[in-house]
Amino acid sequence: MTGLAYERLHENLKTLGMDRISQLLDGHLERAGKENLSMLEVLDHLIQEEVEAKSQNSMNFRTRLAKFPYKKTLEEFDFSFQPSIDKKTINGLATLKFIYNAENAVFLGPPGVGKTHLAIALGLITIKAGLMVYFTTAADLIEDLREHAKLGLLKQRIGKLGRHKLLIIDEIGYLPMSREDANLLFQLVSRRYEKATMILTSNKPFKEWGGVFADEVVAAAIIDRLLHHATVVNIKGDSYRVKDRRRTGLLRSEASEDQVK
């Protein structure tokens, strides 16, 4: 290969955004000479590397946009500690059939039992499938919608959130909402109804959502749309944080101190 052709090749690769091929080209050309590889084999290897690099970059970009507070996978989830969870149900959700069908999933249970872990794990699987995901807490979402409503941009904001194939709303019920806030959430839920998927986590059973939303009618309307096509997972068990404290012996020490007191 002449010096001119070599320079032009690298420039063209740069123009086309094929950075991985540009990085690996020299090594593959050297390998081709040593191992007597055909041009087709060299191209195949280089293009495969480029495809994998672009796929990884795209996944990293979608992960950043999702705004997860941390990363958790299904492999890291300790199902033995939460026997109330049907692992087959979770594995069924992990196929993403519910997302392609625009259905929902709701994880209910006390704090610390793994609701957010499961939601994030499913979110990461969704991202790996090439789909857009957005994670938010209920409190942050309501504040976001409230600010856009004040600016007269609520419809636009809900539309933008609708671009995400999966919307994860964490911690519903941890903080009460006003009727106005509940109406904002209702508009979002209605917009996504049978069009795009939501995963919600809550420490409150559905019968207590009327108190959370300060309006029984709006709460019923939200629940009706959420559960029309949904998988509900009720988690009953101890907090993982309690488990960790037991393992380190801290819980026993605290109990002993309480007995002394």
Image: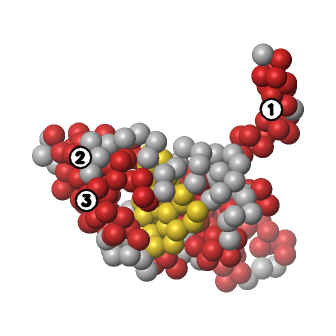
Q: Which mark is residue 251?
A: 1
**As drawn, 249 above or below 36:** above
Which mark sits nearer the N-terminus, 3 or 2? Answer: 2
Circle 3 is placed at which residue position?
A: 217
Q: Are marks 1 and 2 in contact (CB under 8 Å)?
A: no
Q: Is residue 155 above or below residue 89?
A: above
In the foreground, 191 or 235: 235
User: What residue is shown at x 26% (from left), y 51% (from top)?
Assistant: 215
Number of the label disc, if any, that sits on residue 179: 2
Image x and y of residue 228, in percent: 38, 76
Give whichever of 57, 162 is nearer the camera: 162
Q: Quadrant of residue 160?
A: bottom left
Q: Is residue 101 above or below residue 175?
A: below
Q: Earlier in the sequence, mark 1 or mark 2?
A: 2
Residue at the left extreme of this rendering:
152
Disc 2 marks a residue whose amino acid type is Arg
Residue 50: percent from the left, percent from the top?
60, 67
